[in-house]
Amino acid sequence: MRLFYAALALEANTFLPVPTSYQAFLDKLYYPPGRHPEEAGHQTGAIAAARATAKRSGFELIEGSCYAAQPGGAASRAAYERMRDEILGQLKAALPVDGAVFNLHGAMVADGYDDCEGDFLERVRALVGPKAVIGVELDPHCHLTIKRCNAADVIVLFKEYPHTDFAERGEEMIDLTLRTIRHQIKPVKSVFDCRVIQSFPTSIQPMRGLVDKIMALEGKNRVLSVSIAHCFYYGDAPECGARILVLTDDAKPHGDKLAEEIGRELIALREQAAPPEYSVDGALDFALAHPGGPIVIADTTDNAGGGAPSDNTTVVHRLLARGIKSAAVAPIWDPIAVRMAFDAGEGAKLPFRFGGKIAKSSGPPVDADVEVIRCVPNAFQSFSGATVGIGDAASIRMNGVEAVLISTRAQGMGTDLFSNLGIDPKQRKILVVKSNQHFYASFSQIAAQIIYAEGDGPLPRDYKRLPWRKVQRPIWPLDTVTEPRLII
Ligand SMILES: [Zn+2]
């Protein structure tokens, strides 16, 4: 048996004016064929399972290229076509194959392509032929389009947000793909379109209960897999929106019923799904009034995980203006400031400017007399067992407020984002993390309380404020009356 693997991932925030270039993929994650490290990464969750199963089952695994960029603006046409054609060329050279499996984030939009993964998978199908089995692992923040559902046989999404289960879902996708190749199962899809745009963190109720429920359904009554596509709420593509995917073993009527039932439950909880958000000052007031620490404040509107620059300075300005001490903020993307901190050296005290560079929504830069605490070349943070590079990084201190400056854009994910830079996160009263939800798994281990603040970064929680043009209407919350329906 011969199986091909490759990865191509971008979560494209179509509302940002900055295009994602080929270089952006090289900067974040690029492994040529066979060069991916042993451990699965967030965007390459199936590779470890594919390798382990190949070793165990004796089939031949042909590895293609793996590409992933930090979420950002839509990909340039040249970047997408270059990577697509490179992987398709590798697949063509590997033919014939019994199966082709991929990690595709699922919300890639490129200049001229609203559904990159649909385009990619249709081309894969044309190459491998109708009998080969195509398996895909997607991020729940994907656009689960009809085109890609029709092109692939097996689709499995991460269930958790934060996405701590990328490796397990990768194993499941590989397992279902192999069983399909061996004619042990016949996966059939049912897809229900909820007509909803919303963020659905799974670490809190009511979404936690729904994820537990769908997990309990799997493996019984011919249900192979149940996935909830949350949607990517900053991706203006025609098929943006929450969808339910049920894979049954040739039991479509049952799958249809389940998909609709779960979809209706998701619709019913949509208004309670996202946690309440404080204003920036309201969040600081809450933290100061709350005994103990650290109080972790998520600065959600400047989350690089949703494509934001991560250099908005509002929280730092408010901390300094209010004279609040024992507070630390991370990460602030400012490669030039990092370079200046490196040039000054650890322990240096100097007048310093940082943040507030990329867009109007970044706010004004911070000017302060700072002390450089720590300079770390090629620094990293951890996320669910994987290592996430943040480039050269430096930490600085000013009037009791500390900041972690990074040179490779990333959202805050692990508490070691602070500790690796010489700041003990457990000893601070307030930790501000630029992230929407991925920080939760790690920071909940040390937080006295976690709260969310809506600042003035480019990612508003009120999706009605965004200039949607392409998304199919009606869809909630842009419209009040919608028509949820089974679409496959
Ligand atoms: Zn995601």
Image: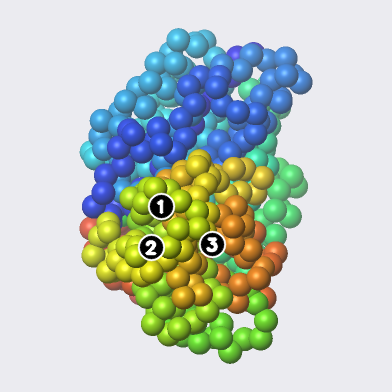
Residue 350 marker: 2
When asked about the image quadrant of residue 306, the answer is bottom left
Q: Which numbered disc flags the more N-terminal residue, 3 or 1?
A: 1
When asked about the image quadrant of residue 321, the answer is bottom left
x, y percentage for residue 104?
47, 37
Residue 435 marker: none
| Front residue (pair 124, 220) | 124
x, y percentage for residue 299?
46, 68
Residue drawn at point x = 67 percent, y = 36 percent: 171
x, y percentage for residue 221?
73, 47
Which residue type does callout 3 highlight?
Gln
When asked about the image quadrant of residue 419, the answer is bottom right
Q: Please, what secondary structure does the residue beneath circle 2 have?
A: strand
x, y percentage for residue 133?
55, 25
Q: Please, what secondary structure does the residue beneath circle 3 have?
A: loop
Q: Residues within 10 Å of mark 1 (few under 14, many from 20)?
A: some
Mark nearest the camera among 3 and 1 is 1
Q: Which numbered disc flags the more N-terminal residue, 1 or 2?
A: 1
Q: Is mark 2 within 8 Å of ligand 1?
A: no
Q: CA distance from mark 1 to mark 2?
A: 8 Å
Residue drawn at point x = 63 percent, y = 63 percent: 424
Q: Which numbered disc flags the more N-terminal residue, 2 or 3?
A: 2
Which residue type does callout 1 highlight?
Ala
Residue 437 marker: 3
Which residue type does callout 2 highlight?
Leu
The residue identified by callout 1 is 344
